[in-house]
Amino acid sequence: MYIDTHAHLFDKQYELDLDEVILRAKQNKVDEIIIPATDISTTEQAIKIAEKYEGVFVACGIHPHETKAWDSSIIMELENLAKHPKVIAIGEIGLDYHYDFSPKEIQIKAFQEQLELALTLDLPVIVHNRESDADMKEIITKYSALGLKAQFHCFNGSLEDAQYYISLNHIVSFTGNITFKKFDFLRDIAKQIPLNKIMIETDSPYMSPIPHRGKRNEPAYLSLVAETLAQLHSVSVEEIAEITSANAREFFSLRNINKPILVYPLGEALYINVTNRCNADCVFCSRKGDAVINGFSLRMNKSQELPALDYIKEIGDPKKYSEVVFCGYGEPTIRWSVVKEIAEYVKASGGKTRLNTNGHGNVINKFDITEEFNGRIDVVSISLNSTDKEQYSKLMKLPEAYFEEMINFVKVAKMKNVEVVLSVVDYPEINIKLAERFARNVLGVSFRLRSYF
Ligand code: SF4
Ligand SMILES: [Zn+2]
Ligand SMILES: [Zn+2]
């Protein structure tokens, strides 16, 4: 329902209970949270958090307070960090003449260079502005003409300023201070701004709304900001949620957020999510649960499965990755013809491929698919799961005959020009040592232990 467009969740104050903070946010209908970083190190921290939780995104940038040691090479670092799929904006950036932690000229230089980066990367910006209105207006006017999209976060200026920024197609966003007793002037401004130009935020851990003022703020309190706005505009709080979330989705290009993830980076590799379907139903598989890896939900129903070309477009240059892995929550060989086509593209473009499979691809496809591995698949990683037929059948909820099928798959794959790896999940009931010996000594292939998520 809500999107908290500004929460500094990397702050030390969340060190001990971030899991609970995120859980409370979800319980209070905050579906998405954007973490604006303040420097390089907090950008890295914010990315780690976004990788862990679904619906959490990052803005990368250098806050005006942190620009003292500005050096233009920082732009390259930011550009690199912005490549992460969860980075959706440049921020927070801007000017702050109240605290004056960094000299004005440096603040302006850093701000302008980051605005240029945003334009190059076609990303919106999150702007911090305090007692710097004249310079801010001049700079924003200049870059608006070049297509800049800005959010004036924690808006605290005049009605004229707000109207000016809106006239340039920017958005203002309100935080907990609109609930403060002495802030009638701000409520008065918020009342006069059309709802399609407003976003909401908590600015956590600061700006706690009444009745939490003075304590640590968190995204779960966002509804208090929404309630005040609802009263001011004489609409329901649901309407505020709907409009401000639609504004945020549009502004940060989150519109396709419920579209299934086709490719996702993990370490140095790129993973391909071809299907959620599987002929097995392993006890340790969260395929039917939340299916979240690295902050991305891999949920995908059959009607959302897409042809090879859509994957190829998203892969781009496969040489950027150590390997391209067909994996996800589901058995990729169910869509062997699509895997084959993507693998052909990756190989022709100089990349490496790995197929993670349960080894049932030949029964599924009713022919020996390993005959088609040559030149397409470099490594095939097959789930051994157990060396015991009965346990294998119980773990995968399949007839025991599938154990033989998997072993045969290993044997035929071994005869092709591919590296064969057998893997087991570090699930408590599985005898890992025995599995390793079986893989290496009995079948003569490599072995890999997969972590159980
Ligand atoms: S074979 Fe893989 S995708 Fe299928 S149920 Fe088992 S763990 Fe999940
Ligand atoms: Zn700020
Ligand atoms: Zn902030």
Image (tube, helix red, strand yellow):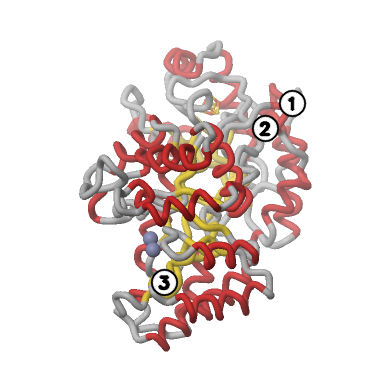
In the rendered structure, the answer to whether residue 339 lies left or right of residue 289 reads right
Ligand 3 is found in which quarter of the picture?
bottom left
Residue matched to label 1: 365
The residue lying toward the viewer, choosing from 340 and 79, is 79
How far across and how far down the image is residue 8, in percent?
Answer: 35, 55
**Label 2 crowd (10 A; few <14 / some 14-19 / many >=20):** many
Up/down of 434 relative to 402, above or below: below
How far across and how far down the image is residue 451, in percent?
Answer: 39, 38
Name the secondary structure under disc 1. helix
**Callout 1, which amino acid?**
Asn
Name the secondary structure under disc 3. loop
- Badge 1 residue CB within 8 Å of ligand 1: no
Answer yes or no: do the residues labelled 1 and 3 have beta carbons within 8 Å?
no
Counting residues from the start of the chain, the first of labels 2 and 1 encountered is 2
- Is residue 141 visible to the viewer in this orientation of the structure? yes
Q: Quadrant of residue 41?
A: bottom left
- Badge 3 residue CB within 8 Å of ligand 3: no
Residue matched to label 2: 333
Answer yes or no: do the residues labelled 3 and 2 have beta carbons within 8 Å?
no
Name the secondary structure under disc 2. helix
Q: CA distance from mark 2 to mark 1?
A: 8 Å
Counting residues from the start of the chain, the first of labels 1 and 3 encountered is 3
Q: Which residue lies at the image location 24% right of the left edge and 47% below the top edge?
A: 213
**Callout 2, which amino acid?**
Thr
Q: Which residue lies at the image location 75% right of the left edge and 53% below the top edge?
A: 345
